[in-house]
Image (cartoon, rainbow, N blue to C red):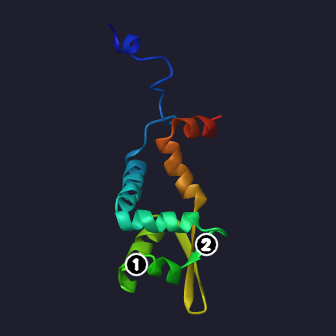
Amino acid sequence: MSRQEKVRPGCCEPMISEALSPADAAELARTFKVLGDPVRLRVLSLIAARKGGEVCVCDITDAFDLTGPTISYHLRQLREAGLVDCERRGTWVYYWIIPARLGLLSQFLNPADAAAANR
């Protein structure tokens, strides 16, 4: 029995329209590596879950038993990966999600998103 005969139709559709280039694969791997840290993943979820779309660094810091410099390090990693952006307002810095960047990750992981993007 061939592989195609063993696989149900539609169950293994390609997730993306074409293979990643070496540069795109390296960039995507760096982004997934950033998200591989539990603190950064939680920070990203705190920002994404905030009504109004942005959160003050003071609220992020209060949610963890970590020092301010450690939180700043994780936020910098998220910024450098293009997942969040920020703006200083007075003494505080406010963070928000970059939806387009998360959309690229979603398209890679979710075949339905990739199919919709290719239409």
For the question of whether residue 83 can be seen, the reply is no
Q: Residues within 10 Å of mark 1 (few under 14, many from 20)?
A: many
Q: Amino acid at mark 2?
A: Glu
Residue 81 pos. (x, y %): 45, 64
Vertical side of 75 occupied by 16: above or below: above
**Observer-nearest residue: 75 or 64?**
64
Instruction: In the displayed orientation, state which residue is furthest to the bottom.
Output: 91
Residue 61 pos. (x, y %): 45, 80
Q: Amino acid at mark 1?
A: Ile
For the question of whether residue 48 can be seen, the reply is yes
The disc label shown at residue 54, or none: 2
In 3D space, how far apart are the residues under numbered discs 1 and 2 (Cα atoms)?
16 Å
Q: Residue at x 51, y 84 (%)?
A: 58
Vertical side of 32 occupied by 86: above or below: below
Q: Quadrant of residue 91 in the image? A: bottom right
Residue 112 pos. (x, y %): 57, 36
Vertical side of 60 occupied by 44: above or below: above
Instruction: In the displayed orientation, state which residue is furthest to the top.
Output: 1
- Total numbered labels placed on residues in the image: 2
Identify the secondary structure beneath mark 2. strand
Q: Quadrant of the C terminus?
A: top right
Q: Quadrant of residue 93 in the image? A: bottom right
Q: Quadrant of residue 54 in the image? A: bottom right
Residue 30 pos. (x, y %): 37, 58
Q: Residues within 10 Å of mark 2 (few under 14, many from 20)?
A: some
The disc label shown at residue 71, or none: 1
Vertical side of 79 occupied by 71: above or below: below
Give the mark nearer the N terminus: 1 vs 2: 2
Q: Residue at x 52, y 80 (%)?
A: 59
**Observer-nearest residue: 23 or 58?**
58
Q: Residue at x 56, y 63 (%)?
A: 48
* Left-right relation of 118 to 73: right
